[in-house]
Image (cartoon, helix red, strand yellow):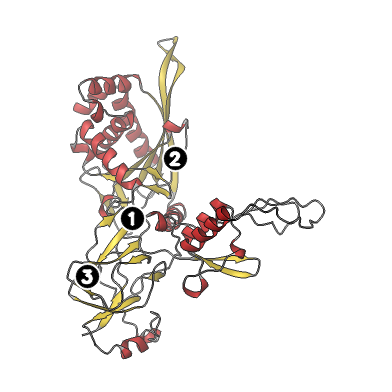
Amino acid sequence: MADKFLMPKLSPTMEEGQIARWLKKEGESFKNGETLAEVDTDKATMEMTALNDGVVLKILKGDGETVPLGDPIAIIGKEGEDISALLAEVGGNGASAAKPAETKAEPQTVPPMGAPISEKPEVAEAAGRSYDAQRPGAEQQGQVAAQQTESKSVEGGNGRLIVSPIAARMAAEAGLNLNNLQGSGPGGRIIKRDIEAAIAGQKAAPQAQPEAQPQAQGQMQTVPGFQQAEIAGASAYREEPTTQMRRAIASRLTESIGPIPTFYLTIEVEMDKAIDFRKQINAALPEEKKVSINDVIIKTVASALMQHPQVNASYQDRSIRYYERADIGVAVAIPDGLITPIIRNANGKGIAQIASEVKELAGRARDKKLKPEEFTGGTFSISNLGMFGIEEFTAIINPPEAGILAIGKSEPKPVVRDGEIVVRNMMRVTMSCDHRVIDGATGAQFLKTLKQMLENPMLMLM
């Protein structure tokens, strides 16, 4: 029996998805487990696979289109089935024609997650909009993985232009004026192939001198690809659609900094023994398995959390949840923003194993190949900007965790020891604390233990 194929929920933060491309076209049959489409998420590009056999009878949402959770993106069934009633129900374009009162109240069942695949250049910069809640859906047949982002409406000289995110980025890089382009996508959307054609045309045609345009007094000529500001004398500008990842980051940080009462504690740590400890470990390891000072810090933080379970906790409305293990989120910078892959049970692993997992997870994070369970569900996080020369900073808590450590750089400084001035490698560490879970004294005791362990790593063995 023909049925609607709905956009599924793939990760805890997903509210909509963008179809990167359909692998099955209208009229094509598919088998259980076959990939039907690739869909962008805020963290990865996912394969949307079939859970049964059938035929793609109608594609309701095409490549590059963004769809909220639970909305139909296709109609599937058996070859030759009459789908006129279903088309009438969705309005012929994928938008449900049912009245709000007719929508079922039960939340949509989350289907199994699809396998992540390598991010593709043409969908890497996809942008998305945020919704307040997941839309419920009753018909959930034959789908698994996907999250989307949307084409953006951009103000142009002749009105509003519909531009796909990758096209907007390519146009900005090539210095193209979007107002001069005709989109070939749905609804006149300017898409990647339009930009490629315009760039090819630029290379083929001789470079003509642009006509001099009259300028108002005091107004500067803008660089191609930039728009003149409305305010006289103000800087010209260009806009790029925000990526789905950047929107997810913005949503999470707003959630964190708003309702969470946060305070900060900073301590300075002498790192000489930790540095020597790392050297001793690396002396026994082959080059490809060398550990970093950050790996040592991860292990030390996990060990300290086991002594201070009040810090390895989260606020849960009517309860405080204390975690058995230290699952440490490690902030990794990627082109689209930030992601925190999780080192599970870091307290029970050796530093060499932690180092290996960090390298592997960070590599897949940059390729957008992480599975949702690999970057959600941590108990505490670490953000290290020391390698960028940052001496001290504060990090924003990743809810529902109660704390995050901001690690600055370790550098030689003059300090007083036993009444004498000596040079030691000093590092400043700042902890952001959720005051609903961690009190000042609790956080201070944790940092004291952390400092003692970093200054004498053998204490981790006790």
Q: In the picture shown, does residue 279 fall above or below 121?
A: above
Spatial distance from mark 3 to mark 2, Cα to Cα? Answer: 48 Å
Question: Which residue is disc 2 drawn over?
Answer: 264
Contact between labelled residues 2 and 3, with CB atoms less than 8 Å apart: no
Extreme top residue here?
Answer: 420
Mark 3 against mark 1, which lies toward the viewer? 3
Residue 48, position as x, y percentages in the image: 27, 65
Pointer 3: residues within 10 angstroms few (<14), some, or many (20+)?
A: many
Q: Residues within 10 Å of mark 2 (few under 14, many from 20)?
A: some
Furthest residue in direction right, as rendered: 217
Q: Is residue 350 above or below residue 38?
A: above
Which residue is label 1 attached to? 44
Whichever of labels 1 and 2 marks the residue nearer the N terminus, that label is 1
User: Is residue 216 at least partly visible in the picture?
Assistant: yes
Q: Amino acid at mark 1?
A: Ala
Residue at the spot x=30%, y=46% of the render? 364
Which is more toward the observer, 428 or 248? 248
Q: Residue at x 42, y 58 (%)?
A: 244
Q: CA distance from mark 1 to mark 2?
A: 33 Å
Displayed quadrant of residue 306: top left
Single out the mark in the foreground, 1 or 2.
1
Tell me where residue 297 appears, x and y as whole percent.
31, 32
Query: What amino acid is found at the position of numbered circle 2 in the picture?
Result: Tyr
Residue placed at 32% from the left, 87% from the top? 86
Mark 3 and mark 1: Cα distance apart in space:
19 Å
* Residue tagged 3: 50
